[in-house]
């Protein structure tokens, strides 16, 4: 926490969460009312002493303060500005930070406008392609998915009301055990819905409300079928809570609402089969060994890794992890981060990140000590997985799972054993388009906010230098 931190918005939310006045909060933090008011107004950064006191009084982690919404919006705003194209005078990072601190609503509105610009650009390109092919159909926009992804992103991938309700529901079915068979028995007893394993092709789950029957795909693994049963239990038992959360989300399109509903039910299903307190205790006991955790809860490795990134309950936080899933082409299909680790919103990710190496090392855990341009080091773990298709004619689904934490927490993670955390680290970045590193032999193109110089009589691995 050596860098100056502006935590006004988060500190104000913590105070409101306790129902405290400014005076009560100032007394608890042992600071003057005027000083606290300046911190909450982002007129002054919080000192290290105040930050330590905030962590103690409000039971929050250092990562939750550092990975605040302001820093995330600054990172997204910087990338959006670069994505819009090179400017004659790039906006300094200090100005971006000040703009987000003083006008966060305006900054988010700019991000929404930029997404709309991207959407129109994609539609224009699709229309031009359709005309050139003498076709009338154009590709649909991806904006609803981006909107839902941002919803979870700014929630820190933790939804308190849904998580605690799912945990209570898990307590209600404690006598049934765990796994596919137990979940099916509870679904039948509680909701009078029977389960049949007869769906084929690419149908994971099909629910017939008239017959009150849930059909599952026989080619899927037992943990995958169990998760789909848990999804149905959440839909029937926690549907009202999901709709309340959707109502507060203020999503702008029906498509986004429908996509987000699936995301919320998936979240609830994960919290049901991996209840928060039990999962947190087991993760600590086995030092975050993901294979052992998956076996303990009878879930897949991906489900366990995803759940690991959600342990952000106030007062009961686990280690802050990021989680990402990519296909073999490097396209990010899932991304969540409770850390300061950032993912590229536009374009590809850094080729030096070990998720790309995992493609050539099937079914193996790869461990990497990596350092981002801001100097923060991470313990990065990557593992490729294969999901069966159930047919020789259908291709198997292949993904890479990536998860990690800051190197300062690595001693509490089994994958950090044997690593020299103060030794050399891989110098990675978010993506080439916004990477600040001057010299990188793997750079594919220059950052959009830096001028470049091409040497006429000299050639290096990268054929240009940044000025």
Image: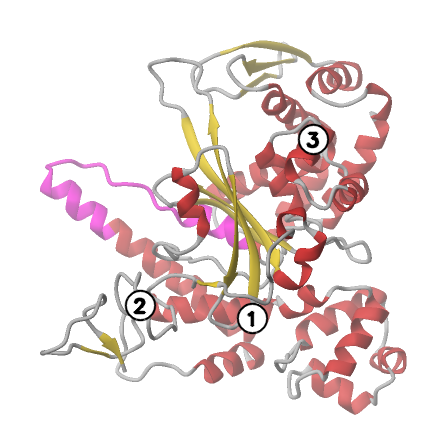
Q: Which residue is mark 1?
A: 71
Please say if the residues under marks 1 and 2 sit with CB atoms less than 8 Å apart. Answer: no
Q: Residues within 10 Å of mark 1 (few under 14, many from 20)?
A: many
Rounded to the nearest angstrom, the CA distance separating label 1 from label 2 is: 20 Å
Contact check, label 1 and label 3, Cβ < 8 Å:
no
Please give left or right for residue 367 compared with residue 442 in the image.
right
Q: Is residue 152 above or below residue 429?
A: above
Which one is nearer the viewer's eye here, 217 or 420?
Answer: 420
Q: Nearer the viewer, mark 1 or mark 3?
A: 1
Distance between the alpha carbons at the discs numbered 1 and 3? 33 Å
In the image: residue 74, left or right of residue 267 = left
From the viewer's perspective, tell me whether residue 369 is left or right of residue 357. Answer: right
**Span highlighted in magenta in the image:** 124-152
The residue identified by callout 3 is 234
Count of numbered circles on the image = 3
Badge 2 marks a residue whose secondary structure is: loop
- Give the quadrant of the C terminus: bottom left
Name the magenta segment's main secondary structure.
Answer: helix
Mark 3 lies on a secondary structure that is: helix
Could you tell which of marks 2 and 3 lies nearer the N-terminus? 2
The circle on residue 84 is: 2
Residue 49 image-quadrant placement = bottom right
Check if residue 132 falls in the magenta segment.
Answer: yes
Instruction: Examine the rendering and report whether any part of residue 184 can be seen.
Output: yes
Q: Is residue 411 above or below residue 165?
A: below
* Residue occupying the point 20% across, 46% down: 127
């Amino acid at each position: 926490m050596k860098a100056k931190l502006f935590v006004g918005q988060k500190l104000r939310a913590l105070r409101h969460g306790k129902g405290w006045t400014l005076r009560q909060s100032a007394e608890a933090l042992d600071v003057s009312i005027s000083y606290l008011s300046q911190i909450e107004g982002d007129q002054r950064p919080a000192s290290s002493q105040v930050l330590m006191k905030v962590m103690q009084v409000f039971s929050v982690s250092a990562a939750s303060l550092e990975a605040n919404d302001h820093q995330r919006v600054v990172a997204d705003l910087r990338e959006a500005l670069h994505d819009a194209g090179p400017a004659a005078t790039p906006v300094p990072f200090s100005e971006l930070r000040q703009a987000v601190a003083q006008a966060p609503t305006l900054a988010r509105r700019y991000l929404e406008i930029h997404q709309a610009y991207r959407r129109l650009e994609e539609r224009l390109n699709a229309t031009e392609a359709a005309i050139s092919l003498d076709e009338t159909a154009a590709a649909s926009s991806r904006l609803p998915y981006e909107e839902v992804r941002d919803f979870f992103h700014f929630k820190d991938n933790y939804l308190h009301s849904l998580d605690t309700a799912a945990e209570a529901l898990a307590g209600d079915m404690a006598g049934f055990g765990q796994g596919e068979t137990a979940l099916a028995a509870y679904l039948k007893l509680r909701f009078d819905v029977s389960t049949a394993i007869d769906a084929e092709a690419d149908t994971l789950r099909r629910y017939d409300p008239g017959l009150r029957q849930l059909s599952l795909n026989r080619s899927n693994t037992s943990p995958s079928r169990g998760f789909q049963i848990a999804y149905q239990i959440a839909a029937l038992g926690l549907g009202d809570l999901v709709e309340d959360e959707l109502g507060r989300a203020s999503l702008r399109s029906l498509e986004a609402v429908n996509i987000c509903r699936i995301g919320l039910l998936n979240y609830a299903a994960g919290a049901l089969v991996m209840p928060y307190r039990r999962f947190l205790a087991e993760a600590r006991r086995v030092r975050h060994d993901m294979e052992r955790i998956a076996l303990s809860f009878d879930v897949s490795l991906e489900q366990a890794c995803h759940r690991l990134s959600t342990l952000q309950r106030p007062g009961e936080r686990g280690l802050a992890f990021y989680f990402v899933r990519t296909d073999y082409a490097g396209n990010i299909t899932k991304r969540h981060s409770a850390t300061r680790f950032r993912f590229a919103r536009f374009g590809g990710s850094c080729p030096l990140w070990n998720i790309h190496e995992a493609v050539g090392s099937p079914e193996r855990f790869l461990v990497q000590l990596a350092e981002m341009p801001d100097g923060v080091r991470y313990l990065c773990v990557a593992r490729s997985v294969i999901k069966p298709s159930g047919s020789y004619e259908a291709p198997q689904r292949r993904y890479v799972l990536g998860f990690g934490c800051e190197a300062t927490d690595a001693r509490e993670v089994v994958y950090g054993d044997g690593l020299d955390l103060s030794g050399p680290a891989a110098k990675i970045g978010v993506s080439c388009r916004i990477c600040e590193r001057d010299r990188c032999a793997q750079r594919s193109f220059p950052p959009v906010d830096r001028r470049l110089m091409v040497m006429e009589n000299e050639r290096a691995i990268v054929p240009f230098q940044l000025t």
